[in-house]
Every structure is written in structure tokens, then in C-alpha cells.
Image: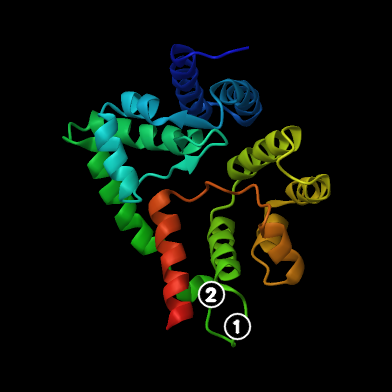
Amino acid sequence: MAVGRNDTLRAIGEILRLRRAEHLADRPLRAELRTVRAFLEDIAGPTVTRAEAARLLGLSQTALDRWIAKDEISSVITPQGRREIPLSELVELFEDVERVRDTGIRRPLAAVIRERRRRSSESVDLDRLLPRSRPRTHRVPELQALAYHRLVAERLSEDVVDDARRRLHRWHQNGRIHPRWAEEWERILATPLERIAKTISADTQRARELRQTSPFAGVLNEQERRRLLRAVEERALA
């Protein structure tokens, strides 16, 4: 079934309403609300056009493109060759913008990005995530994935794991992950939080292979992700 622009924006609006309701609901009801939200996310699709994103955030597409060019808002290239905004990024960004807008601050998006930068400088502590205890022979991307997942492990919650399970399910359905790795991740995500955290943050060959198909993408915001990647690269070149 084809989904039009108005349908997409309406679905996003309902996703935002459900996320607000989830924060107030008890766990059994929260699980039901998430199921409905996952259905709407499938309708909206994994990405949103820049025009739709700009409209939702209340700014021009030109202004949005400037933030994208500065790497302050993440974007991806779709299989059709279009640059679009990940739905998860847009939803979280919109929620932050709405909170700031309610305080009466002008240019709320700029205020949100400034605050994200500040928080990222506090949260991305490379000496904590990658202690200099012994010489490392890993490639830079492997170290970046390790540091990323160690930061995710520090924030792990049932909500984060539930999102990872849904993402994994979608990937499996769409053939975006090999069945072997999908089954492996399903087993991992069925274990207690402490075990999941230990697995994704381990510095082993198996963990490195697992992180190549990790369903924990998008847990960090763009400012945190960018700061972390840059810090790891700078250390490797030092």
C-alpha cells in the first residue's frame, strides 16, 4: 500500500503521542503501546524526507540542510539515492525541540543542539571507555565500535533493549541481516541486562564480529556519536 506525505506525517505525530504515553504507563501497558508504535514506525518507514523533517521541526529545508552539512543532524542515503533523516533521529530531536520550545526559548533547535554538544563532552570519556592499560592492535573502526557499545552498555535499560529487539526483527524480516547473526542476537537480547552489557562491551573476537551487525544503532545522538568517533580516531593517530 502506497503511503502519502500526509500519512507519513500523521504516523509520526501518532508515534510521538505514543512515546509520551509510554513514559506515563506501567510496564504491561507500555509493552502494548510499543507494539502499536512499532506498527506505525513500519508505516512511516525507516527514514523521513528532508522536506517532511523540516516541516515537522518548523524550519525551512535550507536551514535543515545547513545543520546536516555541519554533522549536527544525522542523515543517510536511501537505496533510491536520496539523503533522508532516520525516523528515530527525527522523533527524538522533535521531542527535545518541543521541550525547549515550551520554555519560550527562541530558535529551539539551535538550543537543543548546543545542549547536546555540552552533554556529549561530559559523556564521551575515552579514558573510561578505552583505558590505556595495554597496547592495542585493533583497527580504528573496531575501536570506535567498542567504545560506542561500552557507552551504550552504561545506559542499557529495558527500553533500549526492547528497541533493539524491534530493530532486529525488522532487519530479519527485510533480509538486512544474515539469519546466523539474527539468531545470535536474539539469544543475547533474551538474557538479563547485565549479561547483554557484558557481551556488547567485551574486547573479544566474537564480540567484534557481533558488533558489525549490532541492533543498538541510534542509541547515541549525533553529537555523542560524532565526538566519540573523532576521539577514537585522534587517539589512534597520536
How does the figure colour the protein chain or chains?
rainbow
* Nearer the observer, 159 or 228: 228
Give the residue type at disc 2: Leu
Whole-percent x, y for residue 222 in the image:
41, 50
> Residue at the spot x=68%, y=68% of the render?
202
Q: What is the quadrant of the N terminus in the image? A: top right
Using the rendered view, name the quadrant where residue 137 is placed.
bottom right
Q: Secondary structure at mark 1?
A: loop
- Tell me where residue 42 appears, x and y as whole percent: 61, 24
Q: Badge 2 is on which residue?
A: 130
Is disc 1 in contact with disc 2, using a CB cutoff of under 8 Å? yes
Residue drawn at the location 42% of the way across and 66% of the way down: 230
Residue under label 1: 136
Q: Secondary structure at mark 2?
A: loop
Q: Amino acid at mark 1?
A: Arg
Q: Residue at x 35, y 56 (%)?
A: 119
Placement of 52 over or under 4, stated as above or below: below
Please state if 182 lies on the left or on the right of 88 as rendered.
right
Can residue 194 be spotted in the picture? no
User: Which mark is in front, 1 or 2?
Assistant: 1
Q: Which of pointers 1 and 2 lies earlier in the amino acid sequence?
A: 2
Q: Is residue 38 above or below residue 66?
A: above
